[in-house]
Image (tube, helix red, strand yellow):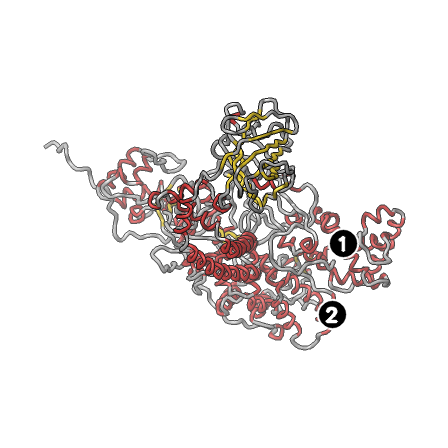
Amino acid sequence: MPPATNAAPPKVDYRKQIKPLLARHCNGCHGAKKVMSGFRADAGRLATRGGDRGAGIVPGQPEKSLLFQVLTGTDDVERMPYEKPPLKPAEISLIKEWIAQGAKFPADEKIVRGRRSSDHWAFQPIVRAKLPEVNNPAWLRNAIDAFVLSRLDREKLLPAPEADRVTLLRRLSFDLLGLPPSPQQVDLFLSDTSPGAYDRLVDRLLASPRYGERWGRHWLDLARYADSNGFTIDGARSIWKFRDWVIDAINADVPFDRFSTEQLAGDLLPGARLDQLVATGFHRNTLVNQEGGTDDEQFRVDAVVDRVNTTGAVFLGLTVGCARCHEHKFDPISQRDFYQLFAVFNNCLDNNDANALGPKISVPSPAQASQQAQLASAIVSAEKPLAEHDRKFAAGMPAWEKRLASIDAGSFTTLKPAKWATAKGAVLTRLDDHSLIVDFSVPANDTYTVTLDTSLESITAVRIEALTHTSLPKNGPGRADNGNFILSEVTISAAPAGGNAKPTPIKITSAVADHSQEGHSVSNTIDGNPKTGWAINTTTGSPNVDRQAIFFPDRPIAHPGGSRLVLSMAHNGESANYLVGRFRVSVSAATPADLKIPAPILAIARTARDERSKAQQAQLVDAYRATDSGRKQLADTLIGLKKRRDAITKAIPTTLILRERKQPRKTHIHIRGDFLRKGARVLPGVPEVLPPMKTAVPVGTRLDLAGWLFDPKHPLTARVTVNRFWQRFFGLGFVETENDFGLQGDLPSHPELLDWLASEFIRRGWAVKDLHRLIVTSATYRQSSATRPELLERDPRNRLLARQTRMRMEAETIRDAALAAAGLISDKIGGPGVYPPQPEGIYILTQQKKAWPEAKGEDRFRRCMYTYFWRSSPYPFLPTFDAPDATTTCTRRSRSNTPLQALTLANDKAFFEISQGVALRILSDGPTPDLQRLRFGFRACLSREPSSEELGTLTEFLSNQRNRFSQSRTAAVSVAPARRPEGVSAVEAAAWTAVSRVLVNLDEFITRE
């Protein structure tokens, strides 16, 4: 019988046909050892589940299955295997058929453990080891020494002797304060030979406010702190309040878990205080790109990535950023893990203000906060009587409105000019409406004098109307090209009508106009200053309309039978033709207060209340309040208080902070790190290899992340932190790769001690000062740094801790030490960045020219951590001595050794000034023998007494410099300080300056032993 044509395809065997096919073509990138895009193909269950781009297999639907799509390269899906030959058509057909048949696989199929379940030491719980036994228990000072000496015993090495007391004091002072001890402090310590002297010294230094500055500078490296935004434009930002918060928190010995939590999520703490908001500046130190044509979303994403990478390096000691574009090549961190951490920070508000700097907050000083509180109280107190006054005064408004409605707007009587004249030849012509118009041939300026008669026996006001006319430029009412005028002065004289009496001047006390140009008030016409005047130009509407001004005498102009008025209108402006082109004069006997009410207000008063607009009613209320002489004092008091409040508010510095969005963002895996190519959606989470994160709400927050980091059972946070502290005291941590505790990182040199210290740190409530005290009081720390031949051969990097470590100091410490040696250093803590002296022309090289207003006075000698830090062009001394560039977190500074460093110490503008300061300090005690001065200078710079050989060398150098400068007074004056002690010549001061330059350029000066 022939076979049926519609027979079903044979059943595909997963074990024999599919699994080997996937193993051959897919498992290299998607197996247990390497998991690209979160997808594993080495087991049917895992292949079906899929990875970062969603489900891998949809049973029964090959065309909807990502596995089939990537093998065929259908639609927009890139074909796999990547950069390798495609599967044969028959192989693809086989996989398609397997999926169509339901993608069946054995339920008991074994899944090989992947690297996410790594047994790597750093991912294991912290184990508190018992103190080991040692050969020489007498050497031990605390538990640290037991672990160190046990290791040395195994290596058959001896620890170094204890350093001498001056070296210990200098080491402690630099390590805890970042400053050298003064000669007086050295003498005090050396004189205290009682038991516990060293411990008391440690306590004094830990209690010093300089401790917060020293260890704050370490933390600012981690926080990538800078005073500018970065990139080419590198605009300024205000975030120094975060720097000050760090210093204050460290001095207050805030437990490290709270110190860190407030920085990661201070804004999410219940009832977050102002200082906790300031703390979130830690993750606002990211770069901001303000260049034109950039994609805001791209740089927002970059900022979030930086926060993830920084958190990973600082708290986890892992290179999580390696999983941004693909699975981590070495550590069990998937791309999904990375974007779960990304999701934790992805809900922060982005840069959304005019300067693209995002959320910020005002941070008043205690004095400013006190002033604000006092003014707020005073404002409330001032508002109450004003409100009560307004309430009572408002009761009289209906009667006032009624009176306004009855005022006769036409209470002015137009006067017919009897005579007129001009001072410089302008021709005036009287028109039928009794106005006077000026002809075309007018001089540059002129004064009009007009005589007018009136039968009115009591005149309370004189009105001048400036009228438009077709013969005037743009219809006037002025003769200027734009129709404006400047009327400089107006005077009025009066005499009885009909007689020959000489008119007497009338005192004009006030004037009002329906409009005045800004800066050209009508009151200028009666101020007696011929250089000022009334003008009528306007920025809104047409200026070429009729205008009027009313002038009020100090008392009514009263003559029985009427008055003869002589009106003078002076135009003294420097601009040509700025004369009134047409005008008319009228008088009134009405009450001056009524006449001062603008016509629009009178019109509103005549309008029924229910027919007025809101704007009209507001105008009427304002006009009524203007008549309230009793209100002015109350209102002025309130206005004055508000102005003071606003001035204080304006002076209060702001700082950048983190804030959460009300509407959470959705987070997706970025395929190959491209933020435009979104893969599977992820929720906030942590790397799978680490303990899970507990969340207080359905979706994890930064506060949940902080709680997870400082869970006592977390295997990394305490280890990483303790390791970094150890690194500060010994040059290297137990794990030399302090930012990589992963599989590629170094193994710890003393794993038991690392875990013991980590557990002790947690047991002591994350108390940093306690941990530092424990370290610096150990015999291990107190060893001499002198090396020995056997150590140079067996342990050149001092990994075994058979001695202390000799280290070149950091850039900031070098400059601070020099300022301290010169007696110049300021003890002021905090405040905005300062601008110490630096070489000329540094900022000319940057695209955006930066200002560097060189500091004067105390700010010139502030600690180096307060120097304003432009990312694009930092203070040049700092990078010369390997300070980080603040673009990313710096967990350990490099230490270079270059000729430029010696040249900088010798010739840098600031260091030359410091050398002069050292010289002045040496010379300040008056006539003193050279040897005594040399010893003092040596102790001021190096803390110790010089040897006889060193004294001899310096004495010879001093003599040579005296001879040199004696031969060239010009050279002496150029080197010597401008201000010198009385009786000290330029030659002497220059010679000692040269000696001081030698002292601050010694290797010992910049080295911590």
The residue depicted at 27 percent of the width and 46 percent of the height is 15
Q: Which residue is mark 2?
A: 187
Hey, what amino acid is under mark 2? Asp
The residue depicted at 38 percent of the width and 48 percent of the height is 665
> Are circles 2 and 1 on residues that touch, CB within 8 Å?
no
Which numbered tag is attached to residue 693?
none
The residue depicted at 76 percent of the width and 54 percent of the height is 915
Which badge, 2 or 1, comes first in the chain's sequence? 2
Q: Residue furthest bottom?
A: 194
Q: CA distance from mark 2 to mark 1?
A: 24 Å
The quarter of the picture where the C terminus appears is bottom right
Residue in front for this viewpoint, 88 or 1: 88
Residue in front for this viewpoint, 651 or 944: 651
Q: Secondary structure at mark 1?
A: helix
- At which x and y percent is residue 453? 56, 35
- At which x and y percent is residue 511? 55, 42
Hey, what amino acid is under mark 1? Ser
Asked if residue 872 can be seen in this view, the reply is yes
In this rendering, the answer to whether 989 lies above or below 587 is below
In this rendering, the answer to whether 43 lies above or below 7 is below
The part of the image, by quadrant, that contains residue 138 is bottom right
| Category of crowding for the residue at label 1, using alpha-carbon neighbours closer than 10 angstroms: few (below 14), some (14–19), many (at least 20) | many
Q: Is residue 314 left or right of residue 665?
A: right
Instruction: Indicate which label's residue lies in the foreground, 2 or 1.
Output: 1
- At which x and y percent is residue 594? 47, 45
Q: Which residue is mark 1?
A: 915
Residue in front for this viewpoint, 116 or 350: 350
Q: Residue furthest left?
A: 1
| Category of crowding for the residue at label 2, using alpha-carbon neighbours closer than 10 angstroms: few (below 14), some (14–19), many (at least 20) | few
Asked if residue 119 can be seen in this view, the reply is no
